[in-house]
Image (cartoon, helix red, strand yellow):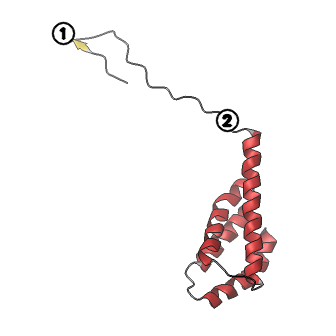
Amino acid sequence: MRWPARSSGTLSTARPAPAATLAPTAPLSSQNDDDLASRYRARKEKLLFEAAQVAEGRGTTEWDALAMQLHKLAGTAGYFGETRLGEWARTFEDRLRPVEDGQDRLGLVRDQYPSLRVVA
């Protein structure tokens, strides 16, 4: 808002300039909600599948990718009503990241996988 202009010691009766207006945003549609929920379920299922593969010793493990999936799940699970899963993912990510040795990481995944199945 601008201050009224001064003219010879008296205030002007000019109105302040109108504030800039923002274009209204459209509310999320149920289609958008369905798309988000679908993407969340797919991400969750991918993590469950990959964690099972690691726990069973199949394939090669991309530890950074697994940690990133845990991070994403931790950030989104609560939005979809899965608070316990989000908390589990955050805690597990925090435990997994600092472990340097691949065999120690594998042991940690094997140890924690059953609890993942319970909260998922």
Q: Position of residue 96 (x, y in %)?
A: 61, 79
Q: CA distance from mark 1 to mark 2?
A: 50 Å
The residue mark sitting in front, 1 or 2, is 2
Classify residue 45 by image quadrant.
bottom right
Q: Residue furthest right?
A: 118
Q: How many marks?
A: 2
Determine if residue 74 is in view: yes
| Residue density around tag 2, few if under 14, some if 14–19, many if 20 or more, within 10 Å | few
Visible residue check, residue 82: no
Question: Which residue is at 79% across, 67% downward?
Answer: 120
Which residue is pictured at 70% across the width and 60% down the height? 77
In this rendering, position of residue 64 left or right of residue 52: left
Quarter of the figure with the N terminus: top left
Check disc 2 and report its element: helix, strand or loop.
loop
Residue positioned 61% across, 68% down in the render: 68
Which is nearer the eye, 100 or 5? 100
Return the x and y of residue 116 as percentages of the image width and height.
Answer: 76, 74
Q: Name the residue tied to disc 2.
A: 27
Disc 1 packing (10 Å; few <14; some 14–19; many ≥20):
few
Foreground of the two, 120 or 39: 39
Residue labelled with disc 1: 8
* Position of residue 3 measured from the top left corner of the image (x, y, whole percent): 31, 21
Give the mark nearest the N terminus, 1 or 2: 1
Amino acid type, mark 1: Ser
Q: In the rendered structure, which amino acid carries the disc numbered 2?
A: Pro
Seen from this angle, which residue lies furthest left?
8
Residue 92 against residue 44 in the figure, above or below: below
